[in-house]
Amino acid sequence: MDITTTTDFSRLFESSINFISDISSWNFSSGNDFKYMYNNFSNFDQDIRDWDISSGTDCSIMLSNGWEENPWQNDFKGEY
């Protein structure tokens, strides 16, 4: 999937359950809106440490309500 020109990823995976696709190589570098992206998701265990979300202007509540279940959460480098 080519998402290299997408800018709005808000609510992309909100309330997802048992998401098991490998999205570690997706290119999020053009994104600026990530709010609520993973809000209320369940059973997400993908390694997204290398995502570049440095162009993000709104990452509010991106990783809430379920993020603590992700084994990679302490290594996430997607700070903006």
Image (spheres, helix red, strand yellow):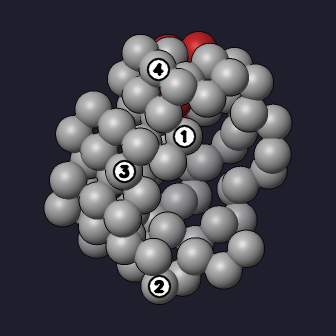
In the figure, residue 17 lies in which quadrant?
A: top right
Q: Nearer the viewer, residue 69 or 2?
A: 2
Q: Position of residue 28 (x, y in %)?
A: 49, 68
Question: Left or right: 3 with respect to 19?
Answer: left
Amino acid type of the residue that numbered disc 3 sits on in the rendered structure: Ser
Amino acid type of the residue that numbered disc 4 sits on in the rendered structure: Asn
Of labels 4 and 2, earlier in sequence is 2
Of labels 2 and 1, earlier in sequence is 2
Using the numbered discs, state the Cα–Cα distance from disc 4 to disc 3 in whole angstroms. Answer: 13 Å
Element on which disc 4 rests: loop
Dot 1 corresponds to which residue?
13
**Which residue is located at x 66 percent, y 80 percent?**
2
Dot 2 corresponds to which residue?
5
Amino acid type of the residue that numbered disc 2 sits on in the rendered structure: Thr
Dot 4 corresponds to which residue?
40
Task: Rate crowding at label 2 as few (under 14), some (14 to 19) or many (20 or more) other CA atoms within 10 Å.
Answer: few
Tag on residue 1? none
